[in-house]
Image (spheres, rainbow, N blue to C red):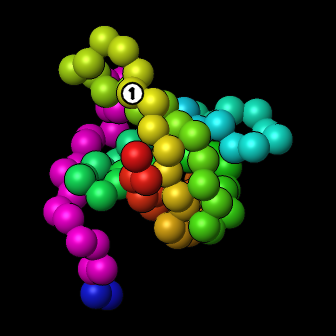
Amino acid sequence: MHDQREFPRYSYREGAAAPFVTIYPTGSAPIRAQVRDIGEGGVGIRGEHDINKDQVVRCTLSLPEIPVPIPTLMRVQWSREMEHGYLIGLQFLI
């Protein structure tokens, strides 16, 4: 499979100290998902809920090294169902 990312990604190990993102889809309850990797162009997450491709969502990114969540706007680039949830690629818009 060819990697189409414009920027390199940096992986995080799963666990209590792993960063997470809270996604606020329009008209739905907030979704919390674990960050699997992050790069200049976006993040890869693992969560229990699917998000529609091309949907623009308001998010907060929580990193263990930073004491406050970082607000951002992202676009869903892709979503893939897994055995226990979904892997989702989000692109930073701001």
Residue at horizontal 28 percent and vertical 72 percent from the top: 5
Q: Position of residue 27 (x, y in %)?
A: 82, 41
Where disc 1 sits, the SS reads strand
Q: Is residue 17 magenta?
A: yes
Q: Nearer the viewer, residue 29 or 12?
A: 29
Q: Is residue 87 above or below residue 30?
A: below
**Residue lying farthest to the top in this orientation:** 67
Name the residue that disc number 1 marks: 70
Q: Nearer the viewer, residue 13 or 54?
A: 54
Residue at horizontal 28 percent and vertical 87 percent from the top: 2
Q: Is residue 48 left or right of residue 88?
A: right
Q: Nearer the viewer, residue 92 or 77?
A: 92
Residue at horizontal 50 percent and vertical 44 percent from the top: 73
Is residue 11 in view from this perspective?
yes
Q: Position of residue 71 (x, y in %)?
A: 45, 30
Q: Is residue 3 left or right of residue 85?
A: left
Amino acid on which disc 1 is placed: Ile
Q: Position of residue 39 (x, y in %)?
A: 24, 53
Q: Is residue 51 left or right of residue 8?
A: right
Is residue 33 in view from this perspective?
no
Residue at horizontal 64 percent and vertical 60 percent from the top: 55
**Residue lying farthest to the front in this orientation:** 94
Bounds of the magenta span? 3-20
Q: Main secondary structure of the magenta part?
A: loop
Q: Is residue 24 magenta?
A: no
